[in-house]
């Protein structure tokens, strides 16, 4: 496990916000049976987690900027550093009492992603990576899966939601192309966890479109530090601005990218 001062700061903030999310998740299970559902409560839980992360990280690293899912861009006095944070990735899972959600924290230095953390407080899975220090799950070093053939690959994706209907035709075409080549496909509903699972070798590959920078930033560091490749769908490095991502080991990344391109 990475025990740098930076990673201590990041894990402490995630553990604190994670305790709140875990408590709130328990409450969501109780609210599930009400007619109105837990919608407003989940929004409040999301904001509370973001507030904890903002306060803890601001205290530990004064002046760093932020890009927050809820709060947007907050400029800091220190222009070199920016946290990119999703306090609750997998919101729809959380809302439906599915224990597949995570806090995602990335640090950018001079525009480069240098550290990433993805924490699922229910599973107590703490995925961390720092540039040059490898990727870790709790105390175990991570390595992407070594399968080379798409036919053996378990690949994850994300399905564009109801509000993204314009994305549906392309998604169906890409899904059809992938289905014809890979062993099978999974869809968990939390991009940060999908990327962490690629880093951990659980998934061989992953692609998704219509994402936001905070969904991907931490996971990109995890995948790369686990020896994998993460790019936009054209193979370039513009995931965060294009909102599209492709990840896997060298072979699966290339083959899956070619497959999707032909869709
Ligand atoms: P969220 O849970 O924080 O909203 C699911 O396919 C993935 O897409 C999740 O990581 C989800 O993040 C992300 N996503 C990004 N933009 C979204 C949106 N507008 N609606 C739903 N999910 C979105
Ligand atoms: Ca998200």
Image: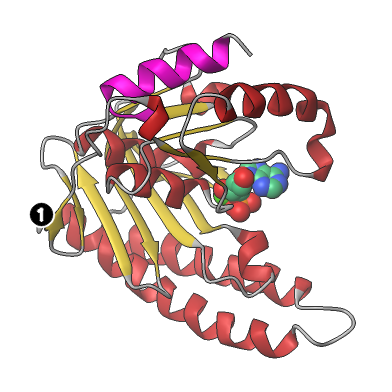
Residue situated in front as seen by the camera: 204 or 109: 204
Q: Position of residue 28 (x, y in %)?
A: 66, 82
Q: Quadrant of residue 118?
A: bottom left
Question: Which stretch is magenta?
Answer: 247-261
Q: Which residue is mark 1?
A: 4
204 left or right of 130 in image: right
Residue drawn at 26 percent across, 30 percent down: 228
- The residue that appears at 33% across and 49% down in the rendered structure is 202
- Residue 127, image x, y percentages: 28, 56
Secondary structure at badge 1 equals loop
Q: Height in image: 97 above or below 154?
A: below
Quadrant of the snapshot with the N terminus: bottom left
Q: Is residue 44 left or right of residue 122?
A: right
On the image, the x and y values in percent for residue 75 come to 48, 40
Is residue 151 something that shows in the picture? Answer: yes
Picture residue at 69% right of the left edge, 90% below the top: 30
Q: Tag 1: Cα neighbours inside 10 Å, few (<14), some, or many (≥20)?
A: few
Q: Residue 245: within the magenta?
A: no
Q: Is residue 256 magenta-colored?
A: yes
- Of residues 173 and 13, the one nearer the viewer is 173
Residue 70 visible in this rendered orientation of the protein: no
> Which of the 4 image quarters holds residue 84?
top left
Left or right: 18, with 214 as reference point: left
User: What secondary structure do most residues of the magenta stretch adopt?
Assistant: helix
- Does residue 233 sit above or below 210 in this rendering? above
> Residue 90: x, y in percent?
58, 57
- Looking at the image, residue 153 sits to the left or right of residue 70; the answer is left
Tell me: residue 15, above or below residue 184. below
User: Residue most toward the right?
Assistant: 35
Residue 48 falls in which quadrant of the image?
bottom right
Nearer to us in this view, 6 or 55: 6
């Amino acid at each position: 496990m990475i025990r740098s001062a930076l990673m201590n700061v990041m894990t402490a903030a995630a553990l604190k916000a994670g305790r709140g999310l875990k408590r709130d998740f328990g409450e969501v299970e109780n609210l599930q049976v009400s007619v109105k559902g837990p919608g407003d409560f989940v929004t409040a839980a999301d904001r509370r987690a973001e507030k904890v992360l903002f306060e803890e990280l601001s205290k530990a690293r004064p002046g760093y900027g932020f890009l927050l899912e809820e709060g947007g861009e907050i400029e800091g006095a220190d222009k070199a550093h920016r946290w990119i944070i999703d306090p609750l990735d997998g919101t729809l899972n959380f809302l439906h009492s599915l224990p597949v959600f995570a806090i995602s924290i990335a640090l950018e230095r001079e525009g480069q992603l240098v550290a990433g953390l993805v924490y699922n407080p229910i599973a107590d899975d703490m995925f961390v990576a720092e540039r040059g220090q490898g990727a870790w799950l709790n105390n175990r070093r991570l390595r992407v899966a070594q399968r080379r053939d798409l036919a053996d690959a378990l690949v994850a994706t994300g399905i564009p939601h109801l509000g993204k209907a314009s994305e549906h035709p392309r998604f169906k075409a890409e899904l059809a192309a992938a289905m014809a080549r890979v062993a099978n496909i999974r869809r968990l509903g939390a991009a940060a966890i999908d990327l962490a699972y690629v880093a951990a070798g659980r998934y061989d590959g992953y692609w998704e479109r219509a994402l936001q920078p905070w969904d991907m930033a931490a996971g990109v560091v995890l995948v790369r530090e686990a020896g994998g490749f993460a790019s936009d769908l054209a193979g370039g490095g513009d995931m965060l601005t294009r909102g599209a991502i492709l990840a896997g080991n060298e072979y699966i990344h290339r083959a899956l990218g070619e497959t999707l391109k032909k869709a």
